[in-house]
Image (tube, rainbow, N blue to C red):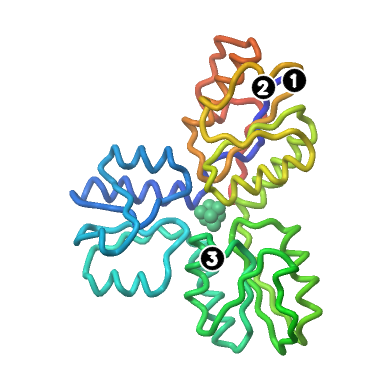
């Protein structure tokens, strides 16, 4: 097959759930907003806006409207402020992210110095830090670990990081403490998308990674893929042109956990046209060769 999709691609459980909660709530509530983008995909955020669900950046902009908490969660203080404002809260935080927040609280309460492996500017990590009772240390790589000894370290991870990164941090932290407690909070949906991407990259001449340029898990898929083969990270089909597929026999497509089916299908159709297969009758992601979703 010249065009194949990674067997696990596109929306994960947590994203499907958050969007469904938003759409269901919009049927009930006339005035409704999301605090920050509900997921890291600008096209989905725009689509929800068309349904009357606006994304606002701060509590001041909510102005009494029902508020959806995004799948990555928000800081503990933000949730408390919303409760004080007495606005209706629709908490669409992914249960796997909530679990990670619980671990942050638990480890710090038990006296562990909390380390969070992740990107310190990512909303999920910013929120996780707030659940620790004492200062958490965020590390993106072993080089970020302070040159100090700790008696007990508790480690959690941003849900969208890779096992390879977690192993590297664990090995490095072992040199900094007497006791290391690791909670593997990398979400299964993330791991299986990374594994499927890696497998497909190995049998492709070109990989197209579809998803928000601001999406951590999509960027991770692009990073994994480009270790094996030329890789393009795009948000929509408009970024593709026929010249990109010259001298390419096998194209692999993969998509982040926040990429909707309609965008994946448009990308598939565009690649088909670019490769001379005009008129493909596929109109469901599930029917693209290679797709086989495994539940997380
Ligand atoms: S990637 Fe995992 S943690 Fe993140 S929203 Fe999806 S299921 Fe939840």
Q: Of marks 3 and 2, which one's residue comes earlier in the chain?
A: 3
Q: Residues within 10 Å of mark 1 (few under 14, many from 20)?
A: few
**Residue 188 on image: x %, y %:** 62, 55
Q: Position of residue 65 (x, y in %)?
A: 21, 58
Q: Residue at x 51, y 62 (%)?
A: 124
Where's residue 129, x and y in %? 52, 73
Q: In the image, is residue 36 above or below residue 43?
A: below
216 with respect to 18 (left or right): right
For the point 59% across and 14% down, the residue is 273
Say which residue label 2 marks.
Answer: 244
Which residue lies under the disc numbered 1? 248
Q: Which of pointers 3 and 2 indicates the residue nearer the eye?
A: 2
Disc 2 + disc 1, Cβ < 8 Å: yes
Alpha carbon distance from label 3 to label 1: 39 Å
147 vs 78: above or below: below
Tell me the residue that label 3 is attached to: 125
Query: Label 3, label 2: how many angstroms apart (C-alpha)?
Result: 36 Å
Q: Considering depth in this image, is 25 or 56 the residue closer to the camera?
A: 56
Check the picture and name the quadrant holding the N terminus. Answer: top right
């Amino acid at each position: 097959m010249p065009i194949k999709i990674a067997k696990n691609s596109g929306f994960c459980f947590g994203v499907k759930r958050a969007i469904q909660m938003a759409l269901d709530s919009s049927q009930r509530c006339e005035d409704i907003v999301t605090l920050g983008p509900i997921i890291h995909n600008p096209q989905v955020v725009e689509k929800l806006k068309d349904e009357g669900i606006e994304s606002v950046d701060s509590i001041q902009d909510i102005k009494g409207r029902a508020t959806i908490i995004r799948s990555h969660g928000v800081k503990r203080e933000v949730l408390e402020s919303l409760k004080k404002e007495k606005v209706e809260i629709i908490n669409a935080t992914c249960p796997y992210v909530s679990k990670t927040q619980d671990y942050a609280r638990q480890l710090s309460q038990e006296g562990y110095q909390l380390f969070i492996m992740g990107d310190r500017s990512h909303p999920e990590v910013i929120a996780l830090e707030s659940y620790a009772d004492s200062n958490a240390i965020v590390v993106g790589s072993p080089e970020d670990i302070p040159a100090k000894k700790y008696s007990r370290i508790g480690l959690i991870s941003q849900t969208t990081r890779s096992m390879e990164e977690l192993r590297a941090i664990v090995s490095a932290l072992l040199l900094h403490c007497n006791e290391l407690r690791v909670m593997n909070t990398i979400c299964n949906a993330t791991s299986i998308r990374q594994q499927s991407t890696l497998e497909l990259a190995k049998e492709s001449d070109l990989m197209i990674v579809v998803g928000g340029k601001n999406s951590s898990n999509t960027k991770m898929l692009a990073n994994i893929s480009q270790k094996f083969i030329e890789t393009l990270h795009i948000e929509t089909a408009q970024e593709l042109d026929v010249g990109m597929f010259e001298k390419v026999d096998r194209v692999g497509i993969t998509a982040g956990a926040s990429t909707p089916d309609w965008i994946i299908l448009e990308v598939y159709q565009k690649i088909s046209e670019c490769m001379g297969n005009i008129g493909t009758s596929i109109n469901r992601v599930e029917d693209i060769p290679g797709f086989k979703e495994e539940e997380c």
